[in-house]
Amino acid sequence: MGEEIGNVFFGNFDIRFGVWLIIAFVCGLLIDRFIRSRHAERLRKKLDRGDKAFFQGIQHILSNEPDQAIEQFTKSVKINSDTIETYVALGHLYRSKGDIERAIRIRQGIILRPNLDKEIRLRAIFDLGLDYRKGGFLNRAISAFHEVLEDDPNNVEALEQIERIYEDMYDWEKAFKTRVSISKLVKGDHRHILAHQKTELGKIQEKNGDRARAEKSYKKAISIFDKCVDTYLHLGDLYFNQQDHKKALSTWKKVVDVAPQFTFLAYKRLEKAYSTMRNLKGVEDFLRDTARKNSDSFTNLALARYLYNKGETDSALNKLNQSIKSAPSFLNARKFIGEILLKEGRNEEALEAYKDLLFILDFPYLKFQCSNCGYRPDELVWKCPQCLKWDSIDIIKPSPSDLPNGNVSS
């Protein structure tokens, strides 16, 4: 389900961002211990003995020089081997460089220390889980995060890491149960996440041939959150594959009411239906009803394809012109209108249509962007590959003024 991004420290984050997490963590612990310790003076002397190497390490981190930072921190721990925070920083640095084996050994060494502060020990176990996860030892990572939860049942970070691992393993049932636990601890609306997880479970069940359980999972997803577009699409697919075309159409049609901007996803299904359905009246009713509710460029294109297949060429061209008028950069509509004109022998009109087409050949009509982190995927996905948020990908449609040469006549 995308790269492992979103670890509390570094993960696959850009190292410059991870730098600030290390500094905040290390310095915060040092200051906190200095203020709270009854032996503050003794701690100060220990820091003094190794402070040159330690603070040189910090400077190398600020300069984005992880190798030099590791060298200085290593010197620091040789001078002052009982300063836990330096080992923590070293562990983070090794993980950021991909040296998971060393990061794990450092973390295990911290955990085995006698009389270790409980909070530091739990953090070390959590970090060990992150190391395991980045190293691909997913079951070990889950065990580490569960160990954290044994001492701190309300640790949301650990629960979120477990959920992400289950999602990476496509174990959607356990991911769903983990999200339920998270929803009891974190305020907010978790329904869309739970619905997506049930939908993903349904996809796997359907792929395995268990259509009855898949249908049950899809319906459960809708009962949890009735605005999950992906659920309606796949439930409709399931009905269509069972030859229940009426149910398929009525299910896909709900996308129009739930999220009109994603109706074009249902049109791909409809085009597939042309070759297998004997009675296409339901398709025509679907398209005309959608056009009345949401007359966007995709709807007009879909209706044009249907009308042309039906033999109503002039009506199809009319719909295509409406589509281009509302979205001059819509490449698919421009290509289709040219194809129709050439087949009809209207070569001069086709030449004029393709003349306009040249201005926008390299200009994508549909672009997508995550509203949470700004990531721009090449295609529509329901979960952002970068920040791992569900339903954060929005459609960015260009305006006519965005075209390379301004407005194109239609």
Image (spheres, rainbow, N blue to C red):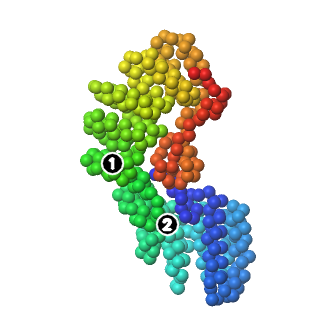
364 with respect to 54 (left or right)? left
Q: Nearer the viewer, residue 334 or 263?
A: 263
Reply above or below: 51 against 245: below
Q: Nearer the viewer, residue 175 or 305?
A: 305
Residue denoted by label 2: 157
- The residue lying at 38 percent from left, 58 percent from top is 176
- The residue lying at 37 percent from left, 56 percent from top is 172
Residue denoted by label 1: 218
Q: Nearer the viewer, residue 76 or 393?
A: 393
Task: Estimate the spatial distance between the alpha carbons at disc 2 and disc 1, rounded to whole Å.
Answer: 29 Å
Q: Nearer the viewer, residue 148 or 32?
A: 32
Name which quarter of the figure residue 306 lies in. Answer: top left
- Mark 2 lies on a secondary structure that is helix
The mark that comes first in sequence, 2 or 1, is 2
Reply above or below: 76 against 291: below
- The residue lying at 43 percent from left, 30 percent from top is 292
Q: Position of residue 223 (x, y in %)?
A: 34, 51
Amino acid type shown at disc 1: Tyr
Reply above or below: 299 against 68: above
- Mark 1 lies on a secondary structure that is helix
Q: Position of residue 64 (x, y in %)?
A: 69, 61
Q: Position of residue 284 (x, y in %)?
A: 36, 26
Reply above or below: 40 against 227: below
- Looking at the figure, which quarter contains the C terminus? top right
